[in-house]
Amino acid sequence: MFATDIQPAELHAALVQAVATGQAGTLVSARMHWQLPFTASLDDGAVVAVEMLDRTLQMTTTHWRIRRSKLGSLLHALGTDDRGRTLVITVNHGPTSEAQLTVFGNHGVVRLDRADLQWSGQLPEARRAASQSLQATLMDVS
């Protein structure tokens, strides 16, 4: 469990630390469900989650499918890369802010569950940083 007011960089650091143990082996997929407060942008949350997981799994040539609910309170993102790895991200609105993150490897699983994430106010800044990182990655690939 994480402390309140955790920043995106702190969540990523916890994920990297958990993955660095090597117990999961080679990472092959990740699943993240992130519930944001009603005032937060689902798009901002999705961009931050995509960048964090894309960087962790070191995805290459990722193809994305995005779906939204008709009411705009739910967003699903499915990413697959040319090596068969997948990212599944669900971002929705709810009364509390929390996340469940599972990363699957060829030898095990890393779970970071029920993190109390109270950083909707910082999401626009986190999204800008994540977008810049993704753009730099795309420029490196071209």
Image (cartoon, rainbow, N blue to C red):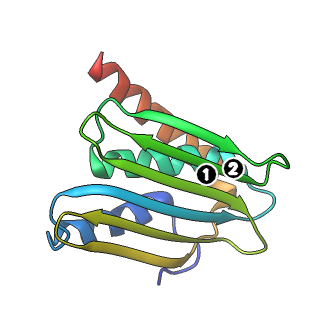
Residue 134, given in percent of the width and then of the height, sits at 42, 33
**Where does residue 128 sit, x and y in percent of width and height?**
56, 37
Residue picked out by circle 2:
42
Marking on residue 141: none
7 to 52, vertically: above or below: below
For the residue pair 126 and 32, the one nearer the viewer reads as: 32
Pick whichever, 60 or 130, lies toward us: 60
Residue picked out by circle 1:
45
Q: Are marks 1 and 2 in contact (CB under 8 Å)?
A: yes
Residue at x-position 29% and y-position 50%: 57
10 Å neighbourhood of mark 2: few (<14), some, or many (≥20)?
Answer: many
Q: Position of residue 112 (x, y in %)?
A: 41, 75
- When asked about the image quadrant of residue 35, the answer is bottom right
Q: Please identify the residue farthest to the bottom as the structure is shown.
A: 1
Q: Classify mark 2: helix, strand or loop.
A: helix
Q: At which x and y percent is residue 12?
A: 38, 60
Question: Is 99 on the left or on the right of 87, as rendered?
Answer: right
Residue at 49 percent across and 58 percent down: it is 8
Does residue 119 sit above or below 136 in this rendering? below
Q: Nearer the viewer, residue 32 or 126?
A: 32
- 9 on left or right of 121: left
- Is 72 placed left or right of 118 in the picture? right
Which residue is at the far front?
A: 84
Please state, as top left, top right, bottom left or bottom right, where the C terminus lies in the image. Answer: top left
Residue type, label 2: Leu
Q: Amino acid type of disc 1?
A: Gly
| Disc 1 from disc 2: Cα separation | 5 Å
User: What residue is drawn where x is 33% and y is 46%?
Assistant: 55
